[in-house]
Image: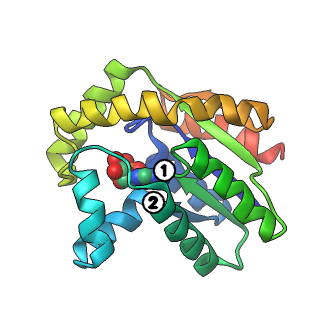
Amino acid sequence: MKNIVIFGAPGSGKGTQSDLLVAKYGFKHISTGDVLRAEIKNETELGATAKSFIDKGQLIPDSLMIDILASTYDAMLPCEGVIFDGFPRTIPQAEALKEMLAKRNTGVTAMLELEVEDTVLIERLVNRGKTSGRADDNEETIKARLDVYHKQTAPLAEWYEKEGLRNTVKGTGALEEISAALCAVIDAK
Ligand code: AMP
């Protein structure tokens, strides 16, 4: 079973590329952002807590996210593979993922990093906001999310480098070419 972490800034194409990987390999897809938005839609207690952070572009506390991740993962087993999209976003989350998978006698197969410049990210997210209906796809919140990304999430790239799992792919250009580059990494594992 493969456990693939797809990594990159908001707007780097993690969701789009995850969909292509799901179609090709039949993997299951865990998007923690989607899980939280579903909780908000269903007006759960967790949704109310999540909303207060998401609307400000801030991260949900690690302890809460780690519990959500573990139960979402277990609900997907057994399967060929899982794509983690939007998790981990902090070093404690990456450590918790490693521990959670080790307890289940498995581990992260590869981290796939989509590299995209900030100017392109802002343009993509502002455009997405016109149709996504996402309250956090507005210019002010986008800037806060990118700031959080650079401060809290980007350092994880080095963490995965040290683990020998980091694979960086250029996240601009034709979708199919980006996907082919990601598949080449997965196929080599
Ligand atoms: P996304 O759909 O991945 O862009 O996530 C949208 C928002 O959900 C983020 O800006 C965070 O507020 C929250 N979120 C999603 N995943 C996580 C995570 N792993 N840790 C903390 N907050 C998260």
Q: Residue at x 21, y 38 (%)?
A: 141
Q: Of marks 2 and 1, which one's residue comes earlier in the chain? A: 2
Q: CA distance from mark 2 to mark 1?
A: 6 Å
Residue 86 percent across, percent down from the top left = 48, 50
Residue 30, horizontal then vertical, whole percent:
52, 63
**What secondary structure is marked by label 1?**
loop
Residue at (56%, 76%) from the top-left corner?
Answer: 71
Disc 1 marks a residue whose amino acid type is Gly
**Quadrant of the snapshot with the N terminus:** bottom right
Query: How many residues crowd around disc 2 within 10 Å: few (fewer than 14), some, or many (20 or more)?
Result: some
Disc 1 Cβ-to-ligand 1 distance below 8 Å: yes
**68 relative position to 129: left or right:** right
Q: Is residue 36 placed above or below 56 in the rendered structure?
A: below
Task: Say if mark 2 contacts mark 1, CB within 8 Å.
Answer: yes
Q: What x and y, as percent, mark residue 75?
A: 59, 80
Q: Is residue 25 visible?
A: yes
Q: Amino acid at mark 2?
A: Thr
> Residue 3 vs residue 143: left or right?
right
**In this view of the protein, which residue sits in the foreground, 98 or 121?**
98
Query: Can residue 177 be seen in this snapshot?
Result: no
Q: Residue at x 38, y 34 (%)?
A: 148
Identify whether 73 is placed above or below 168: below
Q: Is residue 155 left or right of residue 13?
A: right
Query: Which residue in the structure is indicated by mark 1?
Result: 86
The numbered disc on residue 32 is 2
Looking at mark 2, is its residue's CB closer than 8 Å to ligand 1? yes
Label 2: state its secondary structure: helix
Mark 1 burial class by Cα count in 10 Å: few <14, some 14-19, many 20+: many
